[in-house]
Amino acid sequence: MKQYLELCQRIIDEGVWIENERTGKRCLTVINADLTYDVGANEFPLVTTRKSYWKAAIAELLGYLRGYDNAAQFRAIGCNTWNANANDNPAWLANPYRKGEDDMGRVYGVQGRHWRNSQGEEFDQLQKIYQDLKNGIDDRGEILSFYNPGEFHMGCLRPCMHTHNFSLLGDTLYLTSYQRSCDVPLGQNFNQIQVFTLLALMAQITGHKAGKAYHKIVNAHIYEDQLALMRDVQLKREPYPAPKLHINPNIKTLNDIETWVALDDFEVEGYQYHEAIAYPFSV
């Protein structure tokens, strides 16, 4: 929470107003933010200065790991965050690659599980990483990338959190995650949960101890219509201690994640929070 609140205050103190072409709104913006989450110590980075809907963030991560490409698939596992981008984005609605209602196109997990080369052949990035780490291999390229510029036109949204780089030191697994753009009041709440949970899950299914997760954000911003709520409400609140995340120990393989894992397999202990804040969402 200290890192998160310091970043929010830094944006308010040092940010520069930038017009965002996609949303038509101004953003107060800073460049480069680095956050660290101690996954091994189970210091779950859940925002406590407002209520955080952590289940939806984990459900979204599960959808990414399964390669989902449809908002209905996400809804079925408890995540509604893709409804607007799939169905309310005018540019995507007019895109000839959109297959119909709820279709998201070739975004996020589709790239992670079904990356295509120039010959149209598919490659499963996550399966390669899983097999390497399970066998104690770190080739310095254990990288899961959702960022495929050649197929941006085939999806409803370019990935914000675009790359996850795993590193194995002895029997301890680390993660460095890169994010090109972050809506700090809304998006980061999800993103930091997912970075933490991704490392915890991958360590568990590959048989390693979890170390630290490093979260690098390039463009961190607060939208103009979010600023007053952040400055005058959320930053006035005192944070609570970090809760803990418990993951079902019966989750032992990537196949488990792909087939039967559900939100009931995750539990948060000791979560204290202030009341929710209804930040505006920009499509």
Image (spheres, grey):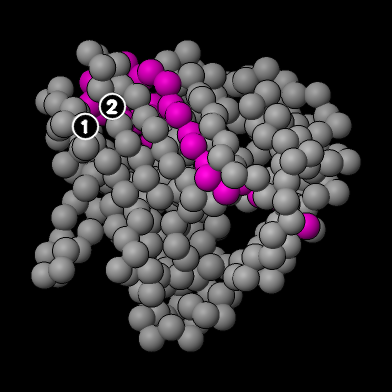
The quadrant the N terminus occupies is top right
> What residue is disc 1 on?
140
- Gap in angstroms between the C-alphas marked 2 and 1: 7 Å
Query: On the image, which quarter does residue 268 sit in?
Result: top right
Q: Secondary structure at mark 2?
A: strand
Percent position of residue 88, x then y? 58, 75
Circle 2: residue type: Ser
Tell me where residue 202 appears, x and y as whole percent. Answer: 31, 31
- Residue at figure coordinates x 67%, y 34% from the top left: 7
Determine which of the numbered discs, if any, sits on residue 167 in the image: 2
* Number of numbered tags placed on the structure image: 2
Q: Residue furthest right?
A: 232
Residue located at (25% from left, 22% from top): 168
Q: Is residue 49 left or right of residue 202?
A: right
Q: Is residue 134 above or below residue 233?
A: above
Q: Looking at the picture, does residue 73 appear above or below residue 271?
A: below
Amino acid type at image mark 1 = Arg
> Is 278 within the magenta?
no
The percent position of residue 215, horizontal first and vertical second, equals 48, 34
- Does residue 67 appear in this view? no
Nearer to me, 35 or 103? 35
Density class for disc 2 (Cα within 10 Å; few <14, some 14-19, many ≥20) is: many
Q: Quadrant of the C terminus?
A: bottom right
Residue numbers of the magenta segment: 198-224
Q: Are marks 2 and 1 in contact (CB under 8 Å)?
A: yes
